[in-house]
Image (spheres, rainbow, N blue to C red):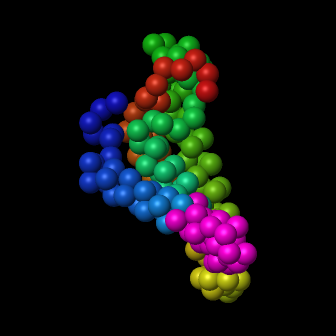
């Protein structure tokens, strides 16, 4: 993978920090809830809601950070078959185009859910329900922009690994 296609070190550190923060808060909330529930017969109702929200954000941040490094699940057997042939540039464009189309569909659906969620709030924490589908919207836009950039530049996909089939 070329240095140009890698995200900056600062962006990598920032996304890593965000993911670690989400995971730490989730683990703490669940741990405290388990101790309170089994040790004292009561729990924190907000723990489940907070963990669910943070898990969605964690997954979407991780997916966005993994895309430019080629760490998403891929069918490398198909790509390896055409790696050095004349069909590879065509296949690369098709892969990037399919990623862009999938991101547009995901962004459209997530946007509709964000709009619906703006009028309601979560039951316990009372955060706007739009915060739950928002990371899917942001993730799809970010990955779509990266895939569109690679499509326009004609960059071949680099899956970053040599597994036969994943």
Residue at 54% of width from left, 61% of height from top?
A: 27
Q: Quadrant of the C terminus?
A: top right
Is residue 37 found inside the magenta-colored segment of the image? yes
Quadrant of the rendering where the N terminus is positioned = top left
Residue 21 is situated, as x and y percent measured from the top left of the image, at 43, 62
Q: Is residue 144 left or right of residue 109?
A: left
Quarter residue 126 falls in = bottom right
Foreground pick, 58 / 104: 58
Q: Is residue 164 visible?
A: yes
Of residues 79 and 87, which is closer to you in this image? 79
Please provide the residue range marked out in magenta. 28-55
Identify which residue is drawn at 65% across, 55% down.
Answer: 105
Chief secondary structure of the magenta portion: helix
* Percent x, y of residue 64: 47, 51
Whether 138 is drawn above or below 116: the answer is above
- Position of residue 152 relative to residue 56, above or below, is above
Query: Where is residue 117 drawn, in percent x and y?
Result: 67, 78
Dividing the picture into quadrants, the one containing residue 118 is: bottom right
Could you say which quadrant of the image residue 165 lies in? top right
Q: Residue at x 54, y 27 (%)?
A: 91
């Amino acid at each position: 993978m070329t240095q140009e296609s890698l995200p900056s070190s600062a962006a990598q550190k920032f996304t890593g920090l965000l993911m670690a923060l989400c995971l730490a808060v989730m683990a703490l909330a669940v741990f405290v809830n388990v101790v309170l529930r089994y040790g004292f017969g009561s729990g924190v109702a907000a723990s489940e809601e907070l963990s669910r929200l943070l898990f969605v954000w964690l997954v979407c941040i991780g997916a966005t950070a993994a895309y430019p490094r080629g760490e998403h699940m891929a069918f490398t057997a198909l790509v390896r078959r055409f790696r050095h042939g004349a069909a590879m540039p065509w296949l690369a464009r098709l892969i990037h185009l399919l990623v862009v189309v999938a991101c547009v569909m995901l962004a459209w659906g997530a946007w509709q859910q964000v709009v619906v969620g703006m009028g309601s709030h979560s039951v316990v924490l009372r955060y706007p329900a739009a915060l739950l589908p928002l990371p899917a919207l942001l993730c799809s836009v970010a990955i779509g922009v990266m895939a569109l950039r690679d499509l326009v530049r004609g960059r071949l996909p680099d899956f970053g690994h040599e597994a036969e089939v994943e």
